Image (spheres, grey):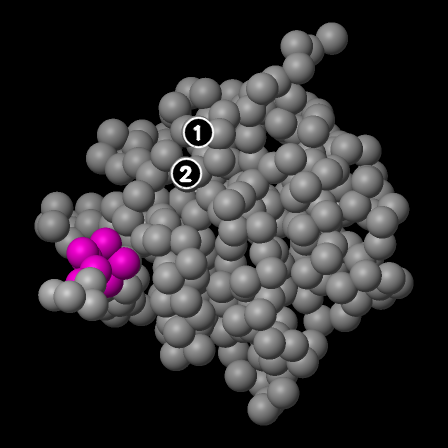
Amino acid sequence: MRQQVSPVASGARVSGAGLGLRRALMDPLADCAVADRPAFLEVAPENWMGLGGRLGRRFREFMERYDFVTHGLSLSIGGPDPLDLAFIDQVRNFLDMHGIADYSEHLSYCTDDGHLYDLMPIPFTEEAVRHVASRVKIVQDVLQRRIALENVSYYAAPGARMSELAFVNAVLAEADCDLLLDVNNIVVNSINHRYDASAFLKGLPLARVRYIHVAGHYVEAEDLRVDTHGSAVSDPVWDLLDEAYALLGPVPTLLERDFNIPPMEELQRELGVIRGLQARQQAPRKSAND
């Protein structure tokens, strides 16, 4: 029997503007001047656990240069299958080996008697809240870390008996875990499911935000967006990020780009936008008497 964990307090152990590490970015990042580097990097443990050879050595070199957070892909926190405790042990070993405090996952599932290779929507029900929360507690116990769950994009809500916002709030409260706030997913869902993005943001338990994700999406139609992480961040996402900073302060923010990866200069420009928005919140505010 494992000893029950007392997870650390909310808040990431990184700061500034970060970037998702992809293998295609390793050479450009290695060539970056120190002043142009992202403040931290994010990896999916599944892509790097047990990696040896030249890539393993390069990864360890990056570990010496950067602070890291991790964002998982295959925990399947809301799935019907039993949790894979052996996999979770592997994740803990990876985090411990590299001294990484922050682990997050998607508020979704990706298994049903096998891997589905996609992030599936969890039914917005009280039963699902209890199911997910009980599994989060197990994961936090095994990892000996407080985890964060990401609000995900979704295109259908099968069996929903509560709103997305109520579901997210209920899961985080029942599980007593943190939120990885994805502002792109809020924008995508607000268009696809016809709700107000700003109101949704303000309705979240913002005190639980660990850090923020921003990414690009694909405009399929006027009333349909697809969360791709394959294009530049859109103006509505930048606007909502700015609003999030006004509510939260300049919390750490991670730029995701999974394919159609542009030259490093373009990613640095987007990182610069993040830094600029963060700096506006760090600047001293003038009083009415100034």
Q: Are marks 1 and 2 in contact (CB under 8 Å)?
A: yes
Q: Residue at x 23, y 54 (%)?
A: 282
Q: Position of residue 20 (x, y in %)?
A: 39, 51
Q: Please identify the quarter of the rendering in which residue 132 is found.
A: top right
Location of residue 202 in the rendering, given as x and y in whole percent from the top left corner: 54, 62
> On the rendered structure, is 197 left or right of 214?
right
Which is more N-terminal, label 2 or label 1? 2
232 drawn magenta: no
The residue pinned by badge 1 equals 101
Picture quarter with the C terminus = bottom left
Magenta-span inclusion, residue 282: yes
Q: Which residue is depicted at the point 65% across and 77% down?
A: 195
184 and 201: which one is in front? 201
The residue nearer to you, when weighing 23 against 96, is 96
Q: Is residue 166 left or right of residue 54?
A: right
Q: Which residue is mark 2?
A: 12
Figure quadrant of residue 157: bottom right
Tell me if residue 54 comes above or below residue 94 in the rendering: below
What residue lies at 20% left-to-right and 50% top-to-bottom?
Answer: 37
Q: Which residue does the image show at 40% across and 74% down from the upper left?
A: 239
